[in-house]
Amino acid sequence: MNEIKQIVEALLFAADTPLSVERIKDVLEDEADIRAIRAACMALRLEYDQLGRAFELREVAGGFQFRTRPELADYVIRLKKTNPLRLSRAALECLAIIAYKQPVFRAEIERIRGVDSGGVLKALLERGLIRIVGRENLPGRPLTYGTTKRFLEVFELKNLEALPGLEELALEAGFSPSPPEPPEVFPLFGQAKEAARPGPEAEEEVLDEGAAAEDSG
Amino acid sequence: MDSSVKPKPHPAGSGGPGPTSALFPAGGPVILSGVEETAYQVKLPIFEGPLDLLLHLLRRNEVDIYDIPIATITGQYLEYLELMKQLNIEVAGEFLVMAATLLHIKSRLLLPSAGPDEEAEDPRLELARPLLEYIQFREAAARLDQRPWLERDVFMRGRNDEIAQPENEPALFNLGLFELLEAFKGILESLSQRQSLAVRVDRVSVRVRMGELMDLFRQQSELVFEELFEGDRTRTQVVVTFLALLEIVRLGFLHIHQETVFGPIRLSVRREAFRLEEG
């Protein structure tokens, strides 16, 4: 086990891209199985965390990679004499829409944002954060966009599923993701709405599951 | 007296009780008095689009997205557009479309519904739905911003020139502008030795020539500097080709390199850039 861990550590150190467990398995061939490699990665991650080193092992874009701690960014930037990555708010909005709705075409992005987004899209393409993934089967066959692996790498995301849920985001911004129960003064309204949405039952179910999980755990 | 700064009257339909000066109290237009009483500046918060502005108004009025006081919000929205006009800021078309939507919803709220059979949906939902969608993605964008970014907050080992700064990219100036100009001069001088039977002057734009050069590099990933000028017969053509080359290099599609001091200048394709361009 110790030996595997060392081998894995060496590979991760020498690699210049995030290494997936599968990729490490390719290198080790029959010397270790996937589970052992995964366990070694996890153990390493924990160790680096506990050692309080300047860098840590992070899960990025489906693999593992050593990265410096955010607190030290100022110093590393000084060493590199580079301009740190910067994206405008418009660019981030576009990127977020693409990340969640991919494949998505330009008109849809602009509908959501309410403003022209051509220039922003171009900038994101140039930075390699998004790519053209195909064409929508609509009049004019508009190009559709998706995020790249680089997007996951830059934003330190394990995969796209690691993005927070949209409804949760609305709630945290202080907005309910669905309309409230209409007041009783308008019975017609109320009936229509109640039939239309799952209503409180669905929420209760989720709560019950949570409670059950707590009980068993 | 300073009559020019007095608040303008409310547009009709504005439900807001406060005076105009209280419209944008925080982060709103800051009125900075100059030395002269007549000289004043107004700073407007910059809104990305109509939804951004609308959201700002909702937050400031602390209203529920599903219970928007349309009259108040429409009034304030139009006031803002008016302010933009007064400041000679061009009001983008999107802002006007939203104004029309707001007024339309407002008018429908005033009219009684056509009958019991009609879909009894609150017309304000037409506003709430896109707003909510926008809020979600705006929040998602804010979350992305908070993440530890590579090359901003966290760094990996060694160089990562793909994201990093353009100044480290092997560019023109690593080779030396003078070497390149020297080579260019050589091409111009060789022109006089070439046979020329040109009767008609072809006007070639830099843009067109860029496209041709790009096609050339799609076929061949590396070319020697001189090869680019092979088809050129006139001084203008050579200049246009040279300018097109500079532009392509500036856009980051090519590497320029020279192995030895007086060796051939080679141009090679930066594959990652071409891949991006082609999607």
Image (cartoon, coloured by chain):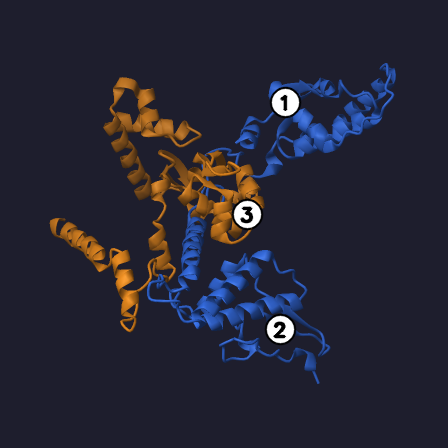
Chain colours: A orange, B blue
Could you say which disc has been placed on residue A117 in the image?
3
Q: In front: B250, or B108?
A: B108
* Callout 1: chain: B
The residues bearing labels 3 and 2 have C-alpha atoms spaced at a distance of: 32 Å
Q: In front: B178, or B30?
A: B30
The secondary element bearing badge 1 is classed as: helix
Mark closer to the observer (1, 3)? 3
Q: Amino acid at mark 3?
A: Ser
Could you say which disc has been placed on residue B197 in the image?
none
Q: Residues within 10 Å of mark 3 (few under 14, many from 20)?
A: some
Count of labels in the image: 3
* Outermost residue to the left: A216
Q: Amino acid at mark 1?
A: Phe
Residue plotted at (29% across, 61% down): A193
Q: Amino acid at mark 2?
A: Ile
The residues bearing labels 1 and 3 have C-alpha atoms spaced at a distance of: 30 Å
Residue plotted at (48% across, 67% down): B57
Mark 1 vs mark 2: tell me if same chain.
Answer: yes
In the picture of the structure, the residue carrying the numbered disc 2 is: B31
A23 above or below A106? Answer: above
Mark closer to the observer (3, 2)? 3
Q: Are marks 1 and 2 in contact (CB under 8 Å)?
A: no
* Residue B84 x, y percent position in the rendering: 62, 65
* Callout 2: chain: B
* Residue B26 x, y percent position in the rendering: 52, 70
Residue B126 visible within the image: yes
Q: Is the N terminus of chain B in the top left, top right, bottom left or bottom right quadrant?
A: bottom right
Q: Residues within 10 Å of mark 1 (few under 14, many from 20)?
A: some
The quadrant where residue A188 appears: bottom left
Instruction: Give the mark nearer the N terminus: 1 vs 2.
Output: 2
